[in-house]
Image: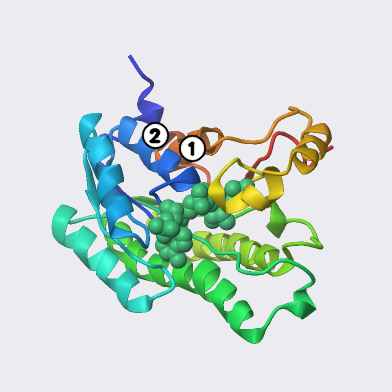
């Protein structure tokens, strides 16, 4: 019999950016642990396809397209989820963007606003809308997908790192504000994971090998490597954990 510490039966989980990569893996494993899940991303057809995959596996899922950079779509995402399930017990803010590479000074003000708007402001807005109904039940878990780029200076993806550091700061603050209502708020900071998002950093054989050499576990991450932490933080196993950012990076930041 599986441990009740990882049992999410009866819970509803909303995961942004869950049609591929890390978000999809998190949605899959939360659903396999018993949660009903909301699949969401900008593309309606991708959302519908993932819902069908989950249906075929006997997992309960609905699809609600949403671009987290658009406040009206974020509002509708929450409203439609509440109308369907009547509650959100687990919120995973996973969708993010990185439109620029290079020194922070070379980014345009528009790129700056896009990164902060998508990666931080939308997360703040989602949390503000979702957490109060959790607090009313005195139970809920919020998980932000941050990055190790938020923990170190970076010559290539600096502004993205700034946004991910802000997510970790938001986690600490929300944990303080909502802890008395038994809401747990944590972040996961992945290292380099083999997804489309990070293709530029791993597709080149030389770059990939260099990265593997610098990583104690001698490999890049896979989306499932991140999902286990999410299941822990979402359920009873994470009941006494809040305000933290957990690194899953094969050891690259400690080497
Ligand atoms: N991969 C890595 O190495 C790595 C490392 C550290 C942290 N992360 C973080 O992990 C998270 C997921 O990244 P990933 O690597 O899994 O990326 P991915 O494989 O490219 O998947 C991104 C998902 O988010 C959706 N999405 C993109 N922009 C969106 C938006 N504006 N609104 C709503 N959905 C959106 C995409 O679908 P649509 O295109 O249909 O919208 C897709 O479902 C991000 O927060 C990223 O910063 C990734």
Residue found 50% across the figure and 64% down from its top: 174
At which x and y percent is residue 201?
70, 49
For the N terminus, the image quarter is top left
- In the image, 153: left or right of 248? right
Disc 2 vs disc 1: Cβ atoms closer than 8 Å?
yes
- In the image, 204: left or right of 17? right
At which x and y percent is residue 71?
37, 77
How many numbered callouts?
Answer: 2
Quadrant of residue 24 in the image?
top left
Residue of label 2 = 29
Farthest top residue?
A: 1
At which x and y percent is residue 203?
67, 43
167 over 91 or under it: above or below: below
Kind of element beneath mark 1: helix
206 over 19 or under it: above or below: above
88 over 49 or under it: above or below: below
What coloring was used for the rendering?
rainbow
Kind of element beneath mark 2: helix
For marks 2 and 1, the one nearer the N-term is 2
Q: CA distance from mark 2 to mark 1?
A: 6 Å
Crowd class of label 1 (few under 14; some 14 to 19; many from 20; radius 10 Å): many
Crowd class of label 2 (few under 14; some 14 to 19; many from 20; radius 10 Å): some
Q: Nearer the viewer, residue 174 or 114?
A: 114
| In the image, the residue with mark 2 has its CB under 8 Å from the nearest atom of ligand 1 | no
Q: Is residue 8 in view? A: yes
Residue of label 1 = 227
For the C terminus, the image quarter is top right
Farthest bottom residue?
A: 109
Disc sitting over residue 111 in the figure: none
Residue found 60% across the figure and 64% down from its top: 98
């Amino acid at each position: 019999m599986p441990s009740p510490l990882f049992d999410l039966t009866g819970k509803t989980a909303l995961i942004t950016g869950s049609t591929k990569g890390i978000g999809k893996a998190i949605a899959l494993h939360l659903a396999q642990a018993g949660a009903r899940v909301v699949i969401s991303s900008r593309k309606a057809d991708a959302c519908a396809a993932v819902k069908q995959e989950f249906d075929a596996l006997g997992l309960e899922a609905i699809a609600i397209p949403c671009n987290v950079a658009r406040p009206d779509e974020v509002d509708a995402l929450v409203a439609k989820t509440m109308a369907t399930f009547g509650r959100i017990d687990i919120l995973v803010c996973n969708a993010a963007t990185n439109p620029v590479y290079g020194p922070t000074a070379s980014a345009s003000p528009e790129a700056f606003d896009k990164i902060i708007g998508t990666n931080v402001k939308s997360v703040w807005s989602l949390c503000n809308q979702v957490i109060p109904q959790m607090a009313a039940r005195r139970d809920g878990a919020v998980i932000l997908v941050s990055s190790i780029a938020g923990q170190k200076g970076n010559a290539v993806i600096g502004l993205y790192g700034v946004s991910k550091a802000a997510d970790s700061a938001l986690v600490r603050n929300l944990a303080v504000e909502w802890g008395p209502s038994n809401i747990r708020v944590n972040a996961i900071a992945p290292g380099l994971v083999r997804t489309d998002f990070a293709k530029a950093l791993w597709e080149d054989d030389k770059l990939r090998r260099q990265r593997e050499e610098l990583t104690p576990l001698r490999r890049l991450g896979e989306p499932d490597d991140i999902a286990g932490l999410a299941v822990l933080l979402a359920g009873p196993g994470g009941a006494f954990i809040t305000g933290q950012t957990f690194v899953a990076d094969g050891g690259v930041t400690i080497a």
